[in-house]
Amino acid sequence: MTRKNAVETAGLSHRYGDVQALSEVSLEIYEGEFFALLGPNGAGKTTLVNLLMTLLPPDGGQAWVLGHDVAKQPEAVRRLLGVVFQDPALDDRLTAVENLEIHAVLYGLPRRRRAEAVQRAVAWAALEEAAKRLVRTYSGGMKRRLELARALLHDPRLLILDEPTIGLDPQGRLNLWERISSLRANGMTVLMTTHNLPEAETCDRVGILDRGKLIAVGSPGELIAANGGEGATLEDVFIALTGRQLRDENATARDLMVSFARRGGEHTR
Ligand code: ATP
């Protein structure tokens, strides 16, 4: 069967020992789409993208990337993907140029195109001045820009970003986000995992994952109209669907506020 979707999964499941991390997820992501997988810590986002990246074997269901079965044709899938992992995957004892060159060789870029592709990637990541410095001297934002540029070096057809802006300061986040957004103009298909609501809200469609299950999929507007109504946010949608907060840090912040208010109350009594 010919499948034109960038990603398709049917009943995709994965279990780590007793933990059912992903449970019968069926999803379609269209070519050219910016798609966000939104969910709290432990929802199964990384497990889902790791299955698509062929880093984990599915133990139930099937998945296809641009028509290739991830279990049966992992090499074809990997060639079509650009990935940025949640944890940094650069060699920080090397320079940016060296990291990019290794990637270019691993992905079989012809020698005559390598130097130019690496220079273009350095410029795209705005790392010209730092290009020959060891990556361990870089800020978090510079590293993440380099990882993104590296993921694009071999002209992938699908870019998978696992929490791309996590841990960056607001300026680093904005800087990286501008680069990610600029890929829209080139028609790149992007699948990203996130707990960042403003980022998810700018995507074409959002899939909400909770406890391994895909509980809703739609454009941000559709999800809000169906589950929250005017003035609602995606977080309200998540609470309406699950009865829980999307972000642990919100819950933690709220608990702290409550406990702070209680302590304050005791103090003034
Ligand atoms: P986060 O936002 O924290 O990255 P996530 O949505 O990406 O979370 P996963 O990392 O896919 O979630 O984890 C899904 C579930 O599987 C969680 O309960 C997690 O503890 C568990 N899990 C993930 N990796 C492993 C592993 N290697 N061994 C055992 N359990 C795991």
Image: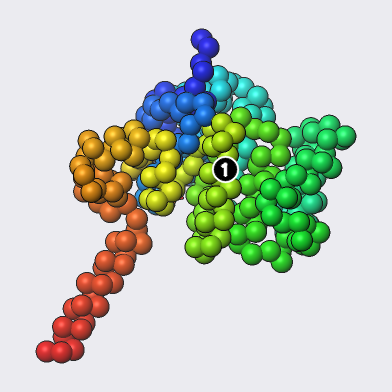
**Toward the viewer: 57 or 87?**
87
Near mark 1 (Cα within 10 A), the count class, few <14, some 14-19 or many ≥20, is few
Image quadrant holding the C terminus, namely bottom left
**Toward the viewer: 5 or 72?**
5
In the rendered image, the vertical position of residue 110 relative to residue 103, given as above or below: above
Question: What residue is shown at x 26% (from left), y 44% (from top)?
Answer: 237
The spot of residue 220 in percent (x, y) is: 34, 39
The spot of residue 212 in percent (x, y) is: 37, 39
Determine the image quadrant of residue 153.
top right
Q: Residue furthest right?
A: 112
Determine the image quadrant of residue 117.
top right
Question: What residue is shown at x 31% (from left), y 46% (from top)?
Answer: 234
The amino acid type found where label 1 is placed reads Ser
In the rendered image, the vertical position of residue 3 relative to residue 56, given as above or below: above
Question: What residue is shown at x 20% (from left), y 42% (from top)?
Answer: 229
Viewer can see residue 22 = no
Viewer can see residue 227 = yes
Q: How is the image coloured?
A: rainbow
Q: Residue furthest left?
A: 269
Q: For mark 1, what is the residue?
A: 182
Ligand 1 neighbours mark 1 (CB distance < 8 Å): no
